[in-house]
Image: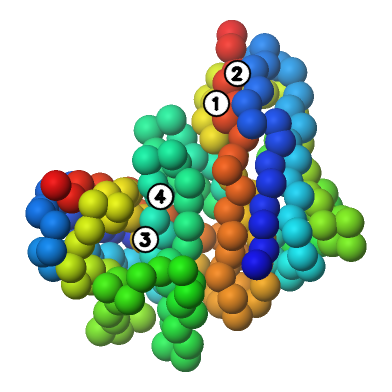
Amino acid sequence: GQQVQQSPASLVLQEGENAELQCNFSSTATQLQWFYQSPGGSLVSLLSNPSGTKHTGRLTSTTVTKERRSSLHISSSQTTDSGTYLCASGNSGTYQRFGTGTKLQVVP
Amino acid sequence: ETAVFQTPNYHVTQVGNEVSFNCKQTLGHDTMYWYKQDSKKLLKIMFSYNNKQLIVNETVPRRFSPQSSDKAHLNLRIKSVEPEDSAVYLCASSFDWDQDTQYFGPGTRLLVL
């Protein structure tokens, strides 16, 4: 079945620096989503990007489907960006698999 | 207020008992989901459901079952809980079947003694 690996496992940044998070998945996926989980545990969907490049606010995701990888770029990081970023991939009609996440800490 | 609501927030029970968690969304979405997040924070989707199709993660034990009365409600029943069922259960919904932009509830934390 689909395996999803994320890197790095953890990352510490100074406020204002950019972050680059990676997601690799083991087989062709028609769905690719990035999620954010706050330190308190609440989960939100950030981006759905099965292919190409997508922007929302300070977030940019680039997915190269044939290379089975996706990245999430966070520009000008803020302390409120601290939390865990999860990548999930899957195919339409089947369930998603999640990576183990990248824990981001942004310090002032 | 439009959102995803879950009850209870927290539930403690003993091995072998039956539990049921409720989820309601007032977003007018057609698709709902149940996720399990274990103590290591690993997130796993359990069920995806709309009025046309139920997709089950085949790794989910049979004692788990989704129950839906209408598209705004998707409850989760666990017939006979086991210690490894202790986790946070998250409910989510999305407008369409492609799981784009899911909205999550606050979660139900289950502790099985």
Q: Secondary structure at mark 2?
A: strand
Relative placement, left or right, of B78 versus B62 is left
Q: Secondary structure at mark 4?
A: strand
Q: Secondary structure at mark 3?
A: strand
Is residue B33 visible in the rendered image? The answer is: no
User: Which amino acid does the dot numbered 2 rest on?
Assistant: Val
For the C terminus of chain A, the quadrant is top right
* The disc label shown at residue A106, or none: 2
User: In whole angstroms, how far apart are the C-alphas of marks 2 and 3?
Assistant: 28 Å
Residue that badge 4 annotates:
B37
Is disc 2 in contact with disc 1, using a CB cutoff of under 8 Å? yes
> Relative to the observer, which residue lies in front, B71 or A93?
A93
Residue that badge 1 annotates:
A82
User: Which amino acid does the dot numbered 3 rest on?
Assistant: Cys
Q: Label 1 is found on which chain of the structure?
A: A
Q: Position of residue B47 (x, y in %)?
A: 43, 72
User: Which amino acid does the dot numbered 1 rest on?
Assistant: Ser
User: In whole angstroms, how far apart are the C-alphas of marks 2 and 1?
Assistant: 6 Å
User: In whole angstroms, how far apart are the C-alphas of marks 4 and 3?
Assistant: 11 Å
User: Which amino acid does the dot numbered 4 rest on?
Assistant: Gln
Q: Position of residue A76 (x, y in %)?
A: 72, 23
Mark 4 or 3, nearer chain start: 4
Asked if badges 4 and 1 are on one and the same chain, I answer no
* The disc label shown at residue B91, or none: 3
The residue that appears at 41% across and 69% down in the rendered structure is: B60
